[in-house]
Amino acid sequence: MNPLLLWFHQTGSPPNFDRFCARWAPVAFAIAMLSLAVGVYGALFVVPADANQHEHFRILYIHVPSAWMSLFIYGAMAIQALIALVWRIKACEILAMASAPIGAAFTAITLATGSIWGRPTWGTWWDWDARMTSELVLLFIYFGVMGLYAAIEDRRAAARAASFLALVGAVNVPIVHFAVNWWNTLHQGATIKLLGPSTIDSSMVWPLVLTVIGTKAWYVGSLLQRSRAMNLEQEAGKDWVRGVVDAP
Amino acid sequence: MHLDFLGMDFLGLAYAVSALVLAWDYLAPRLQLARVRRAIAQRLRRAAAKQADPA
């Protein structure tokens, strides 16, 4: 068997999955907290204020990575949901369902920080433009996945139903991303581009790189931590769990 | 610029809200894990007590 596939199958067994989560969640959180601490310090105290937006532009160092994560996590959740539905892999069901609250948290941060930034910059807390409305819809889809998963007693049936909803909701991800191109929105277009020149000064980029790394690592840490709790809850009656509970 | 009703600037409010949400995201699964471990330990203790005293 392909070594990667073999590793995937071995890690997917509940006892190995628990050990994997217990081992790597603290490492991911340590990377996240270090990156976020240095990145936020740079954002608040090192980079110069923006010529037009003054101090308020510093909100983007938490708003932009959160917005990227809200879409990235949805994409990851949809892929995990697809694998869970097609191959019925229990670990993928757990990973998909554990992703939903983390994605909802980052989407809530995106909406809150965007709204707080909008008040002094645009003169309004909220506008029903395409980007903001589709991001709000994304939050409701996350809530829908979480609600559906919580509403069905059989955990595996619940995960399958919620995975299906997550797949259907994936249609909103490109709408959020391309909303600023497809419609005339109050929200500005992309400032940082992977392909093509970015319109942010290079002296302002490094804290953003750190907060982007920090939020990615945070997702990994939080995902593993949530998955571990869900895995243990589902496996509560099995013999291997005794060793985990006895351990300090 | 300051928020009149909070006496807090927009920048501070944005970072405070973000920190609060991330703190919830960090603590919620830890509490869930502790609750699950307690429930399993309790069930194991009950099973052991039942085995020791079959009457």
Image (cartoon, coloured by chain):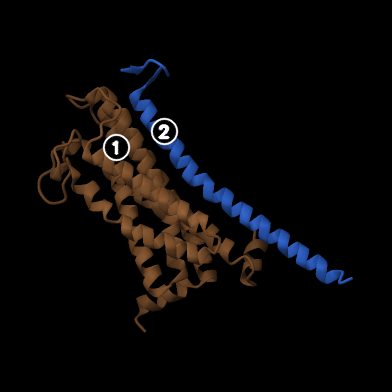
Amino acid type for the residue under numbered disc 1: Tyr
Asked whether, in this view, residue A59 is left or right of residue B53, the answer is: left
Question: Pointer 2: what residue?
Answer: B17
Q: Which chain is blue?
A: B
Asked whether, in this view, residue B45 is left or right of residue A219, the answer is: right
Q: Residues within 10 Å of mark 1 (few under 14, many from 20)?
A: many
Q: Residue furthest bottom?
A: A1
Amino acid type for the residue under numbered disc 2: Val
Query: Residue A61 got which mark?
Result: 1
Asked whether, in this view, residue B38 is left or right of residue B21, the answer is: right
Q: Residues within 10 Å of mark 2 (few under 14, many from 20)?
A: some
Residue drawn 81% across and 71% down? B51
Residue drawn 42% across and 48% down? A143
The secondary element bearing badge 1 is classed as: helix
Q: Nearer the viewer, mark 1 or mark 2?
A: 2
Subunit bearing disc 1: A
Establish if A46 lies above or below B34.
above
What quarter of the picture does the N terminus of chain B occupy?
top left
Residue A66 seen in the current view = no
Residue drawn 61% across and 52% down? B34
Residue B22 seen in the current view = yes
Whole-number angstrom distance, CA of label 1 to CA of label 2: 14 Å
Q: Which chain is brown?
A: A
Give whichever of A11, A146 is nearer the camera: A146
